[in-house]
Amino acid sequence: MDDGFSKTQLKQLEQLFDLRLERRFVEERAYYRQLIRHELADVRAQLADISDRTD
């Protein structure tokens, strides 16, 4: 199959896609870590509120 790319170009494209994929995974992990931090902060606040009401 001739897709118009040389073997060198294909290797470079593969490396570029790998880098983009890795960057995206890093961004997604950071997003979910932040989301979890916010959720935990909300849970802590709710627990503190419940604790205050039962004291």
Image: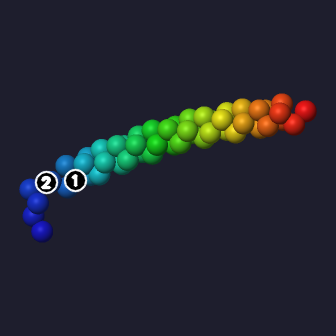
Q: Could you say which is closer to the camera, residue 11 or residue 23?
A: 23
Packing grade of label 2 (10 A; few <14, some 14-19, many >=20) is: few
Q: Quadrant of residue 33?
A: top right
8 lies left or right of 28: left
- Residue 44 visible in the displayed image: no
Q: Tell me which residue sits at (29%, 51%) in the image.
A: 14
The reply to whether callout 1 and callout 2 are in contact (CB within 8 Å) is: yes
**Numbered circle sitting on residue 1:** none
Q: Which color scheme is applied?
A: rainbow
User: Which quarter of the figure is the C terminus placed in?
Assistant: top right
**Numbered circle sitting on residue 10:** 1
- Residue 31 visible in the displayed image: yes
Q: Position of residue 13 (x, y in %)?
A: 25, 48
Mark 2, secondary structure of its residue: loop
Q: Position of residue 16 (x, y in %)?
A: 30, 44
20 lies left or right of 50: left
Amino acid under disc 1: Leu
Amino acid under disc 2: Phe
Which residue occupies the extreme right position in the image?
55
Packing grade of label 1 (10 A; few <14, some 14-19, many >=20) is: few
Q: Which residue is mark 2?
A: 5
Q: Name the N-terminal-most of marks 1 and 2.
A: 2
53 lies left or right of 14: right
Mark 1, secondary structure of its residue: helix
Q: Quadrant of residue 37?
A: top right
Q: Tell me which residue sits at (19%, 49%) in the image.
A: 9
